[in-house]
Image (spheres, helix red, strand yellow):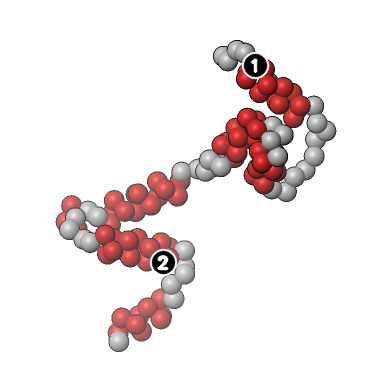
Amino acid sequence: QKHGPAASQTRDQLEAYLAQETFNCGDPIRWWHEKLVSNQWPELAQMALDYLSVPATSVDVERAFSYGQQTVSLYRHSLSSETIRASIVFGNRCKESLVDDCELVELLQE
């Protein structure tokens, strides 16, 4: 626990925030940024921005690593970084149905 004037000031900021009437704000990051810039509640605003800017999940990152692990196997470890990136991006676009199969077949036949 913190003790002293800084801790008391932070606690006062939280109490002032909690004493407000509830309201609906469209963009909480912008709202807290305004509080930080205006120096209304600097410590509380910084804490809120830190929490609000953390990604909600790491599923996309884990999925990318998993797909990358499938792409760069024991027998394909010498692929260039450009080939790996292109393969992962292309595979992801195929999974999301962003690639027209007929158009791809025509392109490969040429």
- The residue at which mark 2 appears reads as 94
Is residue 28 at all visible to an observer of this figure? no
Q: Nearer the viewer, residue 41 or 89?
A: 41
Image height check: is 2 above or below 46? Answer: above
Residue at 31% x, 53% y: name it.
Answer: 68
Q: Amino acid at mark 2?
A: Cys
Instruction: Please tell me how crowded label 1 is: few (under 14), some (14-19), or many (20+) other residues with Cα within 10 Å.
Output: few
Q: Amino acid at mark 1?
A: Pro
| Number of the front mark, 1 or 2 | 1
Which quadrant of the view contains residue 102? bottom left
- Tag 2, which secondary structure? helix
Residue 71 is left or right of residue 52, and the answer is: left
- Tag 1, which secondary structure? helix
Image quadrant in which the N terminus is located: top right
Q: Looking at the image, is mark 1 or mark 2 earlier in the sequence?
A: 1
Which quadrant of the view contains residue 35? top right
Residue 7 is left or right of residue 15, and the answer is: left
Residue at 35% x, 49% y: name it.
Answer: 65
* Whole-percent x, y for residue 100 in the image: 44, 76
